Amino acid sequence: MIYLGADHGGFALKEQLKTWLHDWQMTYTDLGAKMLDPEDDYPDYAFAVAQAVGSGQDVGILACRSAAGVVIAANKVRGVRAVAPLTEEAAQHSREHNDANVLGLSGDWLDDAAAKAIVQRWLTTPFSKAERHQRRLDKITAFEQQS
């Protein structure tokens, strides 16, 4: 499952994302915002998506103006590894090396073509499972469990 969320700054991008996911025949759940509200707050949607993703096999995609806010908020949830890549290569790297499970997108800095390419690369790139990458993720998980 792919969980989606966005505040007013990423709302248009989230709506476009739903079209792409539908065209790619990928299942998603929209956790909001359900309508454009210039007064809404990105942590509400970031926390909802991050909690849905948790440490399971699901992934999430969030959008706000910069992507920074939603990524900061999502990364407060245990088991979440949220990233905000601005290129396809960075998106691929985040999946291969870091097993990122939440993608943050910038509604201000990405045009539709760039956002679409980043999302497609991110969703189709598997975690490498290389020993060094898994070892690093295990250290992050151990630290989270101590906190």
Image (cartoon, rainbow, N blue to C red):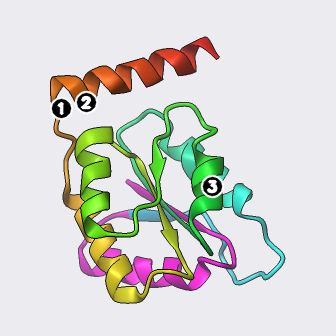
- Verify CB contact (< 8 Å) between mark 3 and mark 1: no
40 in the magenta segment? no
Q: Would you say 33 lies left or right of 133 here?
A: right
> Please, is residue 89 above or below residue 139 in the view?
below
> Please, is residue 19 above or below residue 40 in the view?
below
Q: Nearer the viewer, mark 2 or mark 3?
A: 2
- Verify CB contact (< 8 Å) between mark 2 and mark 3: no
- The residue to which callout 2 is attached is 133
Hey, what amino acid is under mark 1?
A: Lys
- Please tell me the numbered disc located at residue 46: 3
User: Residue 141: x, y in percent?
Assistant: 45, 22
User: Residue 132: x, y in percent?
Assistant: 22, 25
Front position in the image: 52 or 90: 90
Q: Secondary structure at mark 2?
A: helix
- The residue to which callout 1 is attached is 129
Span highlighted in magenta in the image? 1-27
Q: Would you say 67 lies left or right of 21 here?
A: right
Q: Nearer the viewer, mark 2 or mark 1?
A: 2
